[in-house]
Amino acid sequence: MAIETINVPDIGGAEGVDVIEISIAVGDTITVDQEVMVLESDKASMDIPSPKGGVVKTILVKEGDKVSEGTPMLELDIEGAAETAPVTASEPASSAPATASSSAELAVVIPDIGGAEDVDVIEICVAVGDTISEGDSIAVLESDKASMDIPSPADGKVVSISLKEGEKASEGTAVLVLATQGDAPEVPAPAAQASSAVTPTPSVREIPVPDIGGAEGVDVIEVCVAVGDTVAEGDSLVVLESDKASMEIPAPASGKVTALTIKVGDKASQGDVIGQMEVVAAAEPTATKAASVPQAASNVPAASNASQVATPVVSPVIGTEVVVSSSDVYAGPAVRKLARQLGVDLTEVKGTGTRNRVSFEDVHGFVHSVMKARAADGGITSGSGIPPVPEVDYAKFGEIELVKMSKIKQLTAEAMTRNWLNIPRVTQFDDADITDVEAFRKGMKAEAEKSGVKLTPMPFIIKAAATALQMHPSFNVAMHNDGEHIIQKKFIHIAVAVDTPRGLMVPVIQNVDQKGIYQIAKELIELAGKARDGKLKPAEMQGGCFTISSLGPIGGTGFTPMVSTTEAGILGVSKASMQPVWDGSAFQPRMMLPLSLSYDHRAVNGSDAGKFLTYLSTVMGDVRRLLL
Ligand code: CAO
């Protein structure tokens, strides 16, 4: 057993870089080149591989720490240390094996998949460090027609993987880089000659897009400078973003920007002129100068023959993600791509990573919360499982006329659909014996009229409902949209459905618990009048805790009213009539009022609803209880 301390390798000179992820645990057996942690600077995310294989004894850093080249990161119990060779700062990880001199790298891309485009990647079958054989499945794609195993074209060891589950792939999409032994099969052209393409001129020079790894028509997502700005060589001028990488296009020399011929939303390819600059001092061609190389170079899957490609900003041992340092939103290109695919505006997503970096989880979480809120808000989306209503040509059955619904009726229809689809509704029935209340009401009618009040059964029912809510606060609630809370209301406002020529209006009588029968009757008449005259203010239709819908003056023996999403219940009142009621020894003629209580069964359980309606009926049977 040989314990060896493993240090952070060359990370392109970056200092104090954040550890954003530890990918291994103590006790894990890891292989050479296996990713052990992810670092992230403001320029790049870097997968840090282990230069040796062995058993992890100690992890010397934790998420949130800052590290630089040479910082001890692990203690490994080395297995077969002689078989592994340390990766040096300037070596690509893939050259780590002792046979490095005879190895080559092969960029493996999706082969011909029958012309299918943007096919879902449902599985990546290999991991970095795996040794695989020709024909082994490296990924599984799935279109709506077929699942496809993507085989490895050669034997070798997986150096890096650029495709992720959940992404889309087409023919030519990069999958992984394989370290092969001996001659590698033909591979794509090396990534970049970078700014060797930039030709300095004595004074004014054009600024072309340098080699961006062969990407074409890449979106310009940010222009970082304005005409007249003085820039230093290497300063970012423009940010491009493909579905693979965000790339900062650096100033090829120090000088003054004299023209910009590109704007956000344009597309750019290698060689496109993005502007002009007055060069203070002519720059040397910078093929090997890190600062002038588009950062995407580190992200382009290609054979990493160091002598053929420009030195990327980050060390070649470092994988993948390049982020836009100057963007307001801190997110990697893969996350940006996902956001684009889902139509998510990243500025709305709260990043939970280091320095508010937006992760895949953040984007998915954002979409989840939006969809949840939308569903709670009554939004019915396609795919909700509700079959569409077929079009019917009624004219073929006889004469018809298409009558435009009033706005109120349209809104009512929308609200009814929303309520019907969102609320699991139960209705229960009872008959209140209002013989005594009716006798009392009729006795008071003349007196009430002198006070300008028409005394109908409604004010008594409204008051009884308020008292029932007071006694049974579990009914004075509404479901919270989050599905996890109930809103307990501490006020008692009663809504009353009023039929008007323009449609159903539902004014609200406030603080009914604090008002007497006359006052309630007055307000009911006033609000019903306003509703019929179209003079109700929005505030007079809001804040109800419970609704009463009376069809008493019209007729019927019962109906099942619709519960609103802002309340837990609604009382349907039908026509009172004289009924023979058995008192234990004989039938007695009693005035019975049919009541139907619909309630949101998410918020209220059946026994509570039963108690509520029984209490309300009892109060209507003896209004003296309203005084208690
Ligand atoms: N049983 C028997 N008679 C009843 C009754 C009942 N449940 N409710 C009321 N009545 C009687 C009243 O006593 C009155 O009779 P009198 O004129 O002889 O006194 C008559 O019916 C008419 O009452 P009203 O309509 O003037 O007054 P109201 O207080 O009962 O109702 C209001 C007020 C605003 C609810 C009513 O004007 C209204 O708009 N009703 C329509 C309700 C409606 O459209 N509901 C549809 C809901 S759809 O979901």
Image (cartoon, helix red, strand yellow):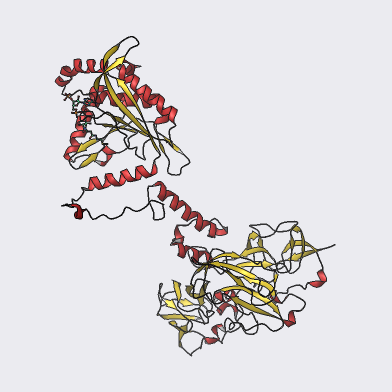
Q: Looking at the picture, does residue 483 appear above or below residue 231?
A: above
Relative to 593, 601 lies left or right = right
Q: Residue 564 sits in which quadrant? A: top left
Q: Looking at the picture, does residue 182 appear above or below residue 61?
A: below
Q: How many marks?
A: 0
Image quarter for ligand 1 equals: top left
- Residue at the (37%, 52%) spot, across then down: 387
Residue 495 picture location, percent across and down: 29, 33
Residue 513 visible (yes or no): no
Residue 622 picture location, percent across and down: 31, 16
Relative to 598, 175 lies left or right = right
Q: Residue furthest bottom?
A: 202
Q: Residue furthest top?
A: 585
Residue 248 picture location, percent across and down: 51, 74
Front residue of this view, candidates 193 and 371: 371
Residue 432 visible (yes or no): yes
Q: Residue 348 sits in which quadrant? A: bottom left
Residue 120 picture location, percent across and down: 52, 66
Q: Residue 59 sits in which quadrant? A: bottom right
Q: Looking at the picture, does residue 599 appear above or below residue 154?
A: above
Front residue of this view, candidates 436 and 623: 436
Quadrant in which the N terminus appears: bottom right
Relative to 464, 198 lies left or right = right
Quadrant in which the C terminus appears: top left
Q: Residue furthest right?
A: 1
Front residue of this view, candidates 391 and 454: 391
- Residue at the (40%, 23%) spot, across then down: 471
